[in-house]
């Protein structure tokens, strides 16, 4: 399977680009045992470029994705998918890669024409459902409403919805893949067998991304080693802290290549975020240097005006002795103070923050200051 998603371009000052630095996450794990599973020839997914930054690089395959799309950056993540036909109840399940092969937990798919709707990455904690736009299961050829419930407000991975699907003739060849076209011709799929199905999917972003580029000040790095252990985020809409979960409904209309997304509704679900939600972590800690290291998280973008980032790190001397454990720094960033044309975040935008860890007072470099550094926005 191949996954692609478009990324918009936008130049920002202070905040730029969002991409997620992924860690193992239990919620994204595929169940170890299945009552039945079928092998799929290949699945490929593509997402649009983020606003503000186009990812460069030449394709290494003979086939290139549609203009404006790039391979899904988080790798071979599981995909929630619904095989739909007019006047028929959807067959829902997910694609996942195991032992080097793409598989599906849908027991059986008969050969025929379908319309594929879904999202990435599959998360067992998210309730996924699909109806047609009328709610009658009669007209999936005209589009669908994709519902996601209990979506975490902050995630380590790029949350995207399927906006196009097509069957390929092999792992590198597909004709007619375009947004707004969900038609897929399936060969018969049953337990442990596959008639040669190659699934190509286009995605679009549902969340915004926050890309943190962090380094250590040169003078401080000569005396201390910093190991970053976690990054967490709290998001706020004006004076209101966002809820821990979000319900999302995406209205998709079948088109001939134009944007199929008619609307996206975000509804808060659950209590307000009390403690920042972690999107990156390392038990041993990642050693920071004077060059920027990049870490990315994704968040619900609706009406968000302020990002509150919490960094946790350990401080060592140059002999490897632990001096301070679990130092915590909190940086509050209001969009109005960083951008001239945005006061709220936007779906599909990636915001990049450059940050430096340095002593409280560089000109003193006393022991208390050395061992209790601050994180500043460059």
Image (cartoon, rainbow, N blue to C red):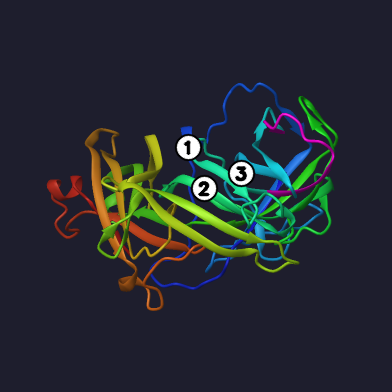
Left or right: 257, with 72 as reference point: right
Kindly identify the residue that appears in the image at 28 percent across and 65 percent down.
Answer: 238
The answer to whether mark 1 and mark 2 are in CB contact below 8 A is no
**Residue 21: percent from the left, percent from the top?**
48, 47
Q: Secondary structure at mark 2?
A: strand
Q: Is residue 174 left or right of residue 232?
A: right
Q: Does dot 3 land on a helix, a strand or a loop? A: loop
* Element marked by disc 1: loop
- Residue 75 percent across, percent down from the top left: 61, 44
Q: Which mark is residue 148?
A: 2
Q: Nearer the viewer, mark 3 or mark 1?
A: 1
Task: Count the numbered circles shown.
Answer: 3
Q: Residue at x 78, y 28 (%)?
A: 190
Q: Which residue is mark 3?
A: 75
* C-alpha gap between disc 1 and disc 2: 10 Å
Location of residue 4 (image quadrant): bottom right
* Residue at 81 percent of width and 40 percent of height: 197
Q: Nearer the viewer, residue 374 or 86?
A: 86
Asked if 88 appears above or below 206 in the picture, the reply is above
Nearer the N terminus, badge 3 or badge 1? 3
Is 110 covered by the magenta stretch? yes
> 231 left or right of 143?
left
On the rendered image, what quadrant is the N terminus found in?
Answer: top right
Q: Dot 2, crowdedness within 10 Å: few (<14), some or many (≥20)?
A: many
Q: Which residue is mark 1?
A: 125
Structural distance between the alpha carbons of marks 3 and 2? 22 Å
What segment carries the magenta color?
102-116
User: In which quarter of the view is residue 210 placed?
Assistant: bottom left
At which x and y percent is residue 144?
Answer: 64, 55
Marks 3 and 2 close (CB-CB < 8 Å) = no
């Amino acid at each position: 399977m191949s996954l692609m998603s478009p990324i918009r371009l936008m130049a920002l000052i202070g905040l730029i680009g969002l991409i997620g630095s992924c860690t193992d996450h239990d919620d994204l794990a595929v169940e170890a045992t299945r009552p039945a599973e079928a092998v799929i020839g290949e699945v490929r997914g593509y997402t649009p470029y983020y606003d503000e930054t186009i990812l460069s690089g030449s394709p290494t395959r003979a086939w290139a994705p549609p203009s404006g799309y790039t391979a899904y950056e988080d790798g071979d993540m599981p995909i929630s998918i619904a095989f739909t036909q007019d006047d028929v109840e959807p067959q829902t399940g997910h694609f996942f890669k195991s032992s080097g092969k793409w598989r599906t937990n849908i027991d059986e798919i008969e050969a025929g024409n379908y319309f594929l709707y879904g999202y990435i990455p599959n998360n067992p904690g998210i309730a996924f459902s699909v109806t047609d736009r009328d709610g009658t299961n009669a007209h999936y050829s005209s589009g669908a409403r994709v519902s996601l419930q209990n979506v975490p407000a902050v995630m380590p991975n790029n949350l995207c919805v399927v906006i196009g699907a097509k069957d390929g003739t092999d792992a590198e060849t597909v004709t007619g893949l375009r947004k707004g076209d969900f038609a897929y011709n399936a060969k018969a799929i049953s337990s442990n067998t596959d008639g040669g199905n190659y699934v190509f999917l286009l995605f679009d972003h549902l969340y915004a991304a926050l890309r943190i580029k962090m380094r250590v000040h040169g003078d401080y790095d000569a005396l201390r080693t910093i190991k970053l252990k976690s990054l967490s985020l709290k998001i706020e809409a004006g004076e209101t802290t966002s809820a821990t979960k979000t319900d999302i409904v995406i209205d998709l209309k079948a088109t001939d290549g134009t944007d199929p997304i008619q609307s996206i509704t975000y509804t808060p679900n659950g209590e307000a975020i009390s403690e920042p939600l972690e999107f990156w972590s390392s038990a041993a800690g990642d050693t920071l240097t004077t060059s920027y290291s990049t870490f990315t998280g994704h968040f619900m973008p609706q009406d968000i005006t302020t990002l509150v980032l919490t960094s946790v790190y350990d401080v060592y001397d140059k002999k490897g002795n632990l001096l301070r454990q679990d130092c915590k720094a909190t940086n509050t960033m209001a969009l109005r103070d960083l951008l001239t044309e945005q006061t709220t975040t936007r779906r599909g935008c990636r915001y990049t923050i450059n940050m430096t860890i340095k002593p409280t007072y560089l000109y003193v470099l006393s022991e208390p200051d050395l061992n209790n550094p601050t994180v500043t926005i460059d």
